[in-house]
Image (cartoon, rainbow, N blue to C red):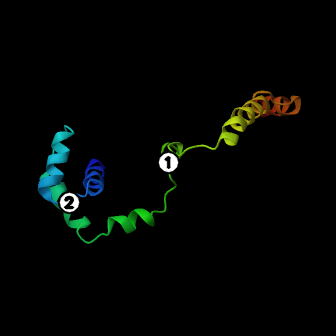
């Protein structure tokens, strides 16, 4: 996975993704470089449009990436209140749920 990350870093820096640059990035990160893997990654990425691959990725955007986006002031004020209400509801199971839970243990 670190080989892919190093390749993405090179792409982001607008540097060529070749064996030499990939090896340098991995070595700078303190990773023991496997020459066969370096050649395989470079060969595999030579025919890939990385920008298009990123745009069409079928994975969800990580929460950390969306956290960097500015939040509207109204949303900031509402968020703690909504979280508090959700926690109150989650913390107290009803008596029926508690009885069902106990019945499942002995049933």
Asked whether residue 27 appears in the rendered view, the answer is yes
Query: Compared to 103, does 50 lie above or below?
Result: below
Q: Which residue is depicted at the point 70% across and 41% down?
A: 74
Q: Which residue is mark 2?
A: 17
Give the structural element (helix, strand or loop) at label 2.
loop
Q: How many marks?
A: 2
Coordinates of residue 39 in the picture (x, y in percent): 16, 60
Give the structural element (helix, strand or loop) at label 1.
loop
Relative horizontal placement of residue 93, taking residue 39 as reference (left or right): right
Asked whether residue 32 appears in the rendered view, the answer is no
Q: Which residue is depicted at the point 70% across and 35% down?
A: 77
Mark linked to residue 62: 1
Which of the 4 quarters of the picture holds residue 76? Answer: top right
- First-in-chain label (1 vs 2): 2
Relative horizontal placement of residue 19, taking residue 62 as reference (left or right): left
Coordinates of residue 96 in the picture (x, y in percent): 88, 33
Cα distance, mark 1 to mark 2?
25 Å
Q: Residues within 10 Å of mark 2 (few under 14, many from 20)?
A: many
Relative horizontal placement of residue 33, taking residue 67 as reference (left or right): left
| Image quarter in which the C terminus is found | top right
Coordinates of residue 37 in the picture (x, y in percent): 19, 55
Residue nearest the observer in this picture, 87 or 13: 13
Q: Residue furthest right?
A: 96
């Amino acid at each position: 996975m670190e080989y892919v990350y190093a390749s993405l870093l090179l792409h982001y820096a607008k540097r060529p993704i070749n064996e030499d640059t990939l090896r340098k990035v991995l070595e700078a990160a303190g990773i023991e470089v496997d020459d066969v893997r370096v050649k395989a990654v470079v060969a595999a990425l030579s025919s890939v449009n990385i920008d298009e691959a990123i745009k069409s990725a079928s994975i969800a955007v990580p929460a950390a990436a969306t956290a960097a986006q500015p939040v509207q002031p109204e949303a900031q004020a509402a968020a703690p209140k909504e979280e508090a209400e959700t926690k109150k509801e989650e913390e107290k199971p009803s008596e029926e749920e508690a009885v069902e839970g106990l019945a499942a243990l002995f049933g």
